[in-house]
Structures are given as structure tokens and as C-alpha cells.
Image (cartoon, helix red, strand yellow):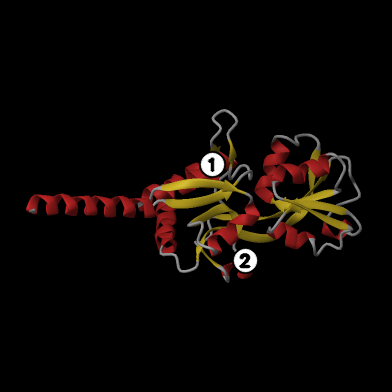
Amino acid sequence: MKKLLSIICAALITATMVGTAFAAKLTVACDTSFPPFEFKDPATGKHTGFDVELWEAIANKIGVDYDLQPMDFNGIIPGLQSNQLDVGIAGITIKPERAKVVDFSDGYYNSGLLILVKKDDNSINGVEDLKGKIISTKLSTSSADFAKTANAKEVKLYPNNDAMFMELMTGGADAVIFDSPVIADFMRKAGKGQVKVVGPLYNGQQYGIAFPKGSDLVAKVNAALKDLRKEGTYRELYMKWFGTEPK
């Protein structure tokens, strides 16, 4: 009987440990296509980018296991609100209205918005020239909010970057408004020689890592970010993906 009880107790302890380990595995959402922050590497089929590698470094620091969950950007905040997601890292701008429904880490990237037009378009030189024009941008983003204030004829909203840029390239939009690092990445690669930026950097903003309200991960992640900056890992990742010193 004692032997049987010991076996049962051992089985219960093992089950508890397995259950705890399973519960401790985080679901971390990233955008499906937000280069150079996150995107699918065509050579490996795996998602990579600045956000993906930064989170990997943070997870190693705080000792957590996780599954990366690429998804449309507009589903990340609702997923955090409903506790279906534990973390969201996808170039998410820290905005007061978002901070009401999710918690944010300290800012980890300084960004802003740029206007992109075709190279031979001289009719748009800044936001004031967008009146009566067609703008394409990404759904549920700060760029969409900003575009709606430009008195444009129409603001076309898309779930991913590719469709947003394609609308400009095929003549369906006069301009794209979006985050500066993504615009810069498109100009260097797919849009090289075909597009240009007009006007200044608009709406200076910071990206933060998002969590469900009350998450105990916030303090741990902030401490890890501080350590990664201090030891130089953050700078190495920044240089790798943006080719410049951290701003």
C-alpha cells in the first residue's frame, strides 16, 4: 500500500510539474510581415527580424519558454485583452488609448511616420498636399489615425505591408503613410529607385512590448531591456537590422 501511495504521489507531482511547465510557455504575437522588425525568411521559412531576435534575447534573460505566433497586426491588441496572448512585439506604438487596455514595457525603439510617393510625383511635398489624394496604409495603426487627419479623398486600409505598398506601386494610391523604418526598408529593397520620401518625420513615437493588463512580465522585461542595452546586445541587434547606431 505504501509503495502504491508513493507511485501515486510521484505521478501527481510529475503531472503538476508538466502542467506548470506547459502553463509557463508563453504565446508571443508578432506581425506576419513588418520588415525589418518581423518577416518570414524565404530561405528558412521561419520568422526573423529585429523584434524576433530582441524578444529571443529577452526571453533568455528572464528564463521563459515561448511559442512565436505570427498574425495580422490588428488582432494583437484584442488577443492580449482576451488573454489569448501573453506578449505582443510588433512595432506597437505606445499610445494612451492602447495603454488603457494593455500594459507596455519601456520604449525600445524611437520611430515616426513618413510619406512615400512615386519618384516622379512632384505634386506631394508634405502632409498639406494630401488633400484630395488617395492614401494607403495599414489597418489599426498610428499611421491610419494620422492619415485620417490629412483631408484625403480616401484612406485605404490593408492588413499587411505588401498590399499597402502594392497599392502605391500600381497606381491605386497617391501616397503611403507608415512607420519610418519600414518605409526605409522598402526604399532600399523592393521599391529601390521607384519611390521617394517627402516631407519631414511626423508624429515622433516609441514602440513598446505589449502585455495583458496586470501582467507580471512587464517589470521583468523592463529589467532585461535595461541589461541588454548595458551589455551591448541591444546595440548589436540594432546595428544588424538597421545599419545605424541606436537613436
Numbered label attached to residue 239: 1
Q: Can you see residue 202?
A: no
Q: Can you see residue 138?
A: yes
Q: Position of residue 244 (x, y in %)?
A: 58, 43
Q: Position of residue 240 (x, y in %)?
A: 53, 39
Residue type beneath disc 2: Lys
Quarter of the rendering containing residue 188: top right
Mark 2 surroundings within 10 Å by alpha-carbon count, few (fewer than 14), some (14 through 19), many (20 or more): some
- Of circles 2 and 1, the one toward us is 2
Above or below: residue 139 compared with residue 49: below
Q: Which residue is mark 2?
A: 95
Question: Helix, strand, or loop for circle 2?
Answer: loop
> Does the CB distance between marks 2 and 1 fall below 8 Å?
no
> Residue, x 51% and y 56% (percent of image)?
85
Mark found first going from the N terminus, 2 or 1: 2
Left or right: 67, with 162 as reference point:
left
Label 2 to label 1, Cα distance in Å? 26 Å
**Count of number-bearing discs:** 2
> Residue, x 63% and y 53% (percent of image)?
73
